[in-house]
Image: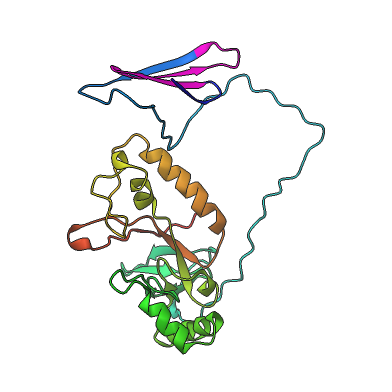
Amino acid sequence: MRSLANGLTLSMDTGGVTGTITAPDGKPILRARYAFTAAAVRRGRPALRVNGMTGEFKEVRAEWGEAVAESAPVPVFPAYAMDNVVPEIKDKAAGFFRVVQKPDGRWWTIDPLGRGVVLLGVDHVTFHGHWCEKLGYCPHQKKNEEKYTDHAEWESETLGRRKTWGFTMLGAGCDPNLKHRGLVHTEFLNIGAELATLGDEYDITPNESRPCSAFPNVFHPDFETFCRYRARQLCAPSRNDPWLFGYFITTSWRGGGAAAWTPDCSTR
């Protein structure tokens, strides 16, 4: 028998594993048993892996002496300004990106200032690039270290080059130092791939610990809860950011190892 925490005890015998949760006064409030359905280990210590917990509180009481103002900082973002727009396409300035259908039937992306834009972006604009397993280092990073005196020089030239080429957006996985400097950006939530790393029950395809090698078990009862958790965790810092076009929800695995990027264009 092994006590893992106050009020939680796991016990194991040749027939299965039993978990017991007790109240502070020692009274059992929950007991669950998982029986072995086939030949299993007969020696060892039970262990518990927790990926999340839910609880219900009743008769909650609170006391306080004086009100305390919420101390959570409110993000302040630079004012939106981008020159590469389609001037003849205009609509209501809503303060964030949206898509509208015009009378001629065509759909347009409207920027926070009410101007039509054509979004052209590229993913993974970073100083270091990707790791090469065969070489044992990042060849892109090595080239950049030889070419630029510091990271700031790389940032300036990289942004200038993309604007000259007509790019208007930073795709998924780009260097955060490039944001809010003349190009629209996106955020990468990676919900599915993160869920798949929690264990075999959470992935459908084999997880090889590399991009696009895992597909989450969307039928698992924890899937919805995990999606809500990641959304609150990662979307809140970007709330009200006028430069944000939307979110790449996740990556998924497909035959041939191609990535399936799924952008959610709603920033609210």
Horizontal relation, residue 161 to residue 64: left or right: left
| Residue closest to the far right | 65
Residue 189 % position (x, y): 42, 55
Residue 95 % position (x, y): 55, 64
Q: Total of numbered circles in the picture?
A: 0
Q: Quadrant of residue 40?
A: top left
Question: Do we see residue 56 in this rendering?
Answer: yes
- Residue at 35 percent across and 48 percent down: it is 197
Does residue 229 sit above or below 162 in this rendering?
above
Extent of the magenta region = 8-28
Q: Quadrant of residue 259?
A: bottom left
Q: Nearer the viewer, residue 243 or 89?
A: 243
Q: Quadrant of the N terminus?
A: top left
- Residue at 61 percent across and 66 percent down: it is 77
Residue 251 % position (x, y): 32, 57
Colouring mode (rainbow / by chain / secondary structure / one colour): rainbow
Does residue 260 sit above or below 120 in this rendering?
above
Q: Is residue 10 magenta?
A: yes
Q: Nearer the viewer, residue 254 or 67?
A: 254
Horizontal relation, residue 233 to residue 250: left or right: right
Horizontal relation, residue 49 to residue 39: left or right: right
- Residue at 27 percent across and 56 percent down: it is 213
| Residue closest to the far top | 27
| Residue closest to the far left | 255
Question: Do we see residue 167 in this rendering?
Answer: no
- Residue at 78 percent across and 31 percent down: it is 64
Residue 68 % position (x, y): 77, 41
Chief SS of the magenta region: strand
Horizontal relation, residue 77 to residue 112: left or right: right
Q: Is residue 247 magenta?
A: no
Does residue 73 sit above or below 134 in this rendering?
above
